[in-house]
Image (cartoon, rainbow, N blue to C red):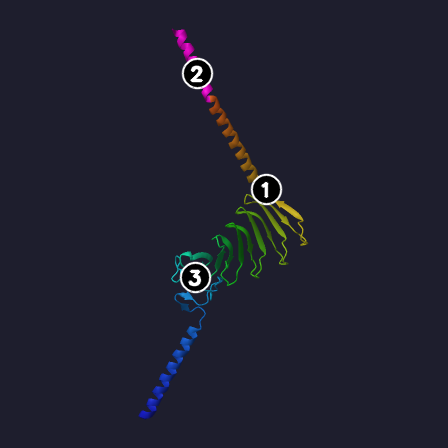
Amino acid sequence: MSTRKLGLALVGVLVAAASGCGSDSNKEAKSPLKDVAGVPHDDQSRCDFRGRGDREVSEATGPGAHRPNIRRVFGVTGQGDDRRRVLLCREVDTNLDGAKDIVRTFTDRGEPLSELTDSNYDGKIDTWITFARGRVSKMQIDNTGHGEPDETRFYVAGKLSRAQRDTNGDGKPDVWEIYEEGKLQRIGVDLDFDGHVDRWDRDEIALREIAEKERQDEQAEQKKQQEEKQKESAPESAADAGATDARVSARRR
């Protein structure tokens, strides 16, 4: 091979290599999970902050994470000394796969408002939570992966009060659960799926536990009343004992 041909061949190899490196760089730049300042470009964020001048974003790294996996979005009002930040949204990547799987929103008073969760990390929300005065008031769950809730739980004062489930996928509840003090009391079942309860099943164990608790409370109240009566009669008993001692002493004299 002549020197000229050898030179042309080397030039071709170098051009091909340079072209290949450039191609890989372009592919990497288009990757949806490419890190930008330690945060993935597309992390399935559901907080409203992009392109908004009235929002501030804070990124944090949680335990076990090697890059930021907690995002807080603040609403900003006022200027200068009147400037104020209020937490409006917080989202977390709990399994550290680069995508946010829990997002919670807040009221302008800082109380929880709602929460969305991807509990099985498949990229789809399957749990919806509603708060009232900082406590859970309703929870909806998608147990089938169809994107719609098939179970709803209702809470009173932070405790589970009742629940309903759709077991046949027709969009209507056919099982109802009633709770007392957070414990299951009875279950209603719609056997023919006409929207009405056909049979109520009582949880005898739960009922016995409730009855036993009531009995213990009653015994405790009775004991308390007896102790109070004993305290009230104690001074009289002491006075009687003193009088008896005085009479005995007088007789001895």
Q: Main secondary structure of the magenta part?
A: helix
Name the element at disc 2: helix
Label 2 crowd bin: few (<14), some (14–19), many (20+), radius 10 Å: few
Dot 3 or dot 2: first in sequence order is 3
Tag 2: residue type? Ala
Tag 3: residue type? Glu
Closer to the camera, 31 or 20? 31
What's the CA distance linking mark 1 and mark 3?
A: 54 Å
Tag 1: residue type? Glu
Task: Report the mark closest to the observer, 1 or 3.
Answer: 3
Residue 204 has which mark? 1
Closer to the camera, 192 or 216? 216
Dot 1 or dot 3: first in sequence order is 3
Is 200 on the left or on the right of 108, as rendered?
right
- Residue underneath mark 2: 241
Decide: is 130 above or below 211.
Answer: below
- Residue 250 lies in the magenta-colored region: yes
Which residues fall within the magenta stretch?
A: 234-253
- Residue 210 lies in the magenta-colored region: no
Q: Residue at x 42, y 15 (%)?
A: 242
In the rendered image, residue 91, in percent from the top left (x then y), is placed at 46, 59
Name the element at disc 1: helix
- Residue underneath mark 3: 56
Q: Quadrant of the C terminus?
A: top left
Q: Residue at x 58, y 53 (%)?
A: 152
